[in-house]
Amino acid sequence: MKGVAILKKKWFVHVCVLLLVVVLAACSSSNNGTSENTPNASNSSNQGGTPSESSTTDEQIELRMTWWGGQERHDRTLEVIEMYEAKNPNVKIVAEYSGFDGYFDKLTTQFAAGNAPDIIQYGGNLNDFVARGVVLPLDEYVGGALDLSKHDQSMIDAATMDGKLYGVTLGSNGWGVLVNKTAFEQAGVPLPSPEWTWEEFEQAAIQITENVEGMYGTADFEEDGFGIFLAQRGKVVHENGKLGFNDQDVKDWFQMWDGFRNSGAAVIPEIQAAATQTPEQSLIVKGDVAMQLIASNQYGAYSNATEDQFALYLPPNNSDTGENGASLRPSQFLSGYAETEHPEEVAKFLAFFTNDLDATAVLGNDRGAPVNSEVRENLISNASEIDEVIFSYIQTVSQTSDAPYVPNLPGYNETQALFKRAAEKIAFGEASVEDATNEYWTEVQKVMEKYEQ
């Protein structure tokens, strides 16, 4: 009897446990359907059309985001990240930011190791990384997590390659010459006319060097300037996988800048070689030069880093063609890593970054004139003095130049290093213009052949 009693007791316990499991499962199923775990109107952004709640579960998600820039861009981006996290409590975004120097070298190493960030800022070299298969295609999220309905079609096209979308364009801009008006006034040199030529550019730079102690007229415009130089000749850097210029174009560019150094217009090579693209440490902000080529979206970062007064000018015209070679172009792209574990969450953040009116008001024009028409109208209506300069410059470029947007050369890190090495050999007297041009021309064709395969 005692054994029977024990068996009955065990049976009763098993039945109770089974009933408890059924009840708990029912409760869990009921709770999963409540509004506490689903997006709702009160918790979503009403200024951008993207849901603020990132997931219908309580899953904790961590994303890494990397970008380059100066301190002003870092501060703005960090503030927007905090805004997104506040609206999406289950998402943590780890910021990884730096200056431009070495940015893509580090990124390439991370790709090789398989530990690249989930959200990545690219420049005109997005095509290079798409070819490597490391960029996340976003097509399946368009119209859902990623709303592009108010984005300029040309900027959508700029991020579309082989029929697939690989990012959102963060802004449109154009290359321009940043002129230190304070230095020009100190030197007693009249500000240039909007239609200045390379010859007038050189003469103004010489006078700055001669009249302002410790300052040179201009920094070297480097490879970005060469693209402008080609556009002034009706050429492009590359098209359909083929170089769009020849060795004579390279020689003419290097010869022109060698002449600028010899005349005293351009900064000496020792200073140029140490130059950085970070606005706060740039040659023009430090007072080493009075003119420097910049992307128009960076006008605010440069201006805010000094007490001197700056102005933004179109590149000097080619005297023969009358063309300035400037073009409207995507400033940067924001994309996802192909191996991210949270592709939809990446897409939602890209939408927030480019569509939310509160977020984009914080970002301003730092990455270029916004490509979302609603966002752009909102910024124009509340434009600061610096914003007005940027918008005005973009308008001027659109009215004075029909130069096309051309992505960077394939193998951008390699080709950029080749160009820089050739320019420095000439500047330091280690090679003639002829020899440095020949070396560059031979090596750049090898790089192009490698990426054609």
Image (cartoon, grey):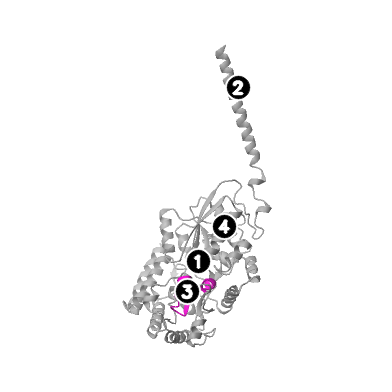
Q: Secondary structure at mark 2?
A: helix
| The magenta stretch spans residue 278 | no
Inspect the image, locate mark 3, and give the three-letter code of the amino acid beneath it.
Val
Whichever of callouts 2 and 4 sits on the residue coming sooner in the sequence is 2
Residue 275 x %, y %:
41, 72
The magenta stretch spans which residues? 280-302
Which residue does the numbered mark 4 point to in the structure image? 82
Tag nearer the camera, 2 or 4: 4
Between 193 and 134, the one lying in front of the other is 193
Residue placed furthest toward the left: 430
The answer to whether residue 332 of the structure is visible from this angle is no
Which residue does the numbered mark 1 point to in the structure image? 71
Q: Quadrant of the C terminus?
A: bottom left
Which residue does the numbered mark 2 point to in the structure image? 12
Q: Few, some or many C-alpha atoms within 10 Å of disc 2 (few <14, some 14-19, many ≥20)?
A: few
Cα distance, mark 2 to mark 4? 54 Å
Q: Secondary structure at mark 4?
A: helix
Query: Tag on residue 236?
Result: 3
Cα distance, mark 3 to mark 4? 41 Å
Residue 262 x %, y %:
37, 84
Q: Can you tell which quarter of the image residue 169 is in?
A: bottom right
